[in-house]
Image: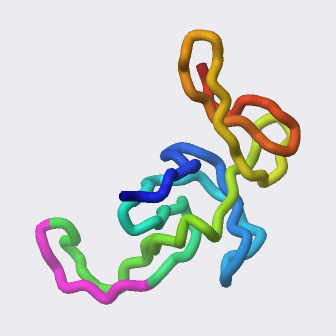
Amino acid sequence: MGLNVHIKKGDQVMVITGKETGKSGRVLSVNSKEHRVLIEKLNLIKRHTKPSQRYKEGGIIERENPIDISNVMVICGSCSKPSRTGIKVIDSGKKLRYCKKCGEIIDKG
């Protein structure tokens, strides 16, 4: 049984703890089984790699490393602040995420 994840691919998030505290970026992927997210240009690591099909040159490659999902918060589009999210059920029965600070709906549509 997995944790209910309130962060989705494409969301703008801010890191709230760890070495990248205060920085924000766009979510590239979410691994809900391991509760980790990959954020664009954050938590970069250097990998020493041999030349292969994927990396013709090899050498030192810099890439993103996953961050625990509990260490990031969604940035609300209307109030531009990191906030917790809740779920509202609209008239059509669709579940949408909303900002708990200002009450605006985060999901488009």
Q: Name the side, left or right, on which 11 lies relative to 32.
A: right
Which x, y percent locates residue 64?
A: 46, 70
108 above or below 16?
A: above
Q: From the viewer's side, name the closer residue of 49 and 93.
A: 93
Give the residue displayed 39% in from the left and 68% down from the top: 34
What's the coloring here?
rainbow
- What residue do we see at 72% from left, 67% from top? 23
Residue farthest to the left, as pictured:
53
Q: Horizontal and vertical percent for residue 78?
A: 82, 34
| Front one among 45 and 85 | 85
Please identify the residue farthest to the bottom as the structure is shown. Answer: 48
Residue at 52%, 77% (x, y): give it: 44
Q: Is residue 16 magenta?
A: no
**Quarter occupied by residue 56:** bottom left
The image shows a total of numbered marks equal to 0
Seen as rendered, the residue at the extreme front is 1
Horizontal and vertical percent position of residue 85: 70, 46
Quadrant location, the C terminus: top right
Task: Indicate left or right for 91 with 63 as reference.
Answer: right
Q: Quadrant of residue 70?
A: bottom right
Q: Position of residue 75 (x, y in %)?
A: 73, 49
Vertical position of residue 69 compared to residue 44: above or below: above
Compared across the picture, whether 85 is left or right of 44 comes to right
Image quadrant containing the N terminus: bottom left
Residue sitting nearer the eye, 69 or 51 = 69
Magenta highlight range:
46-53
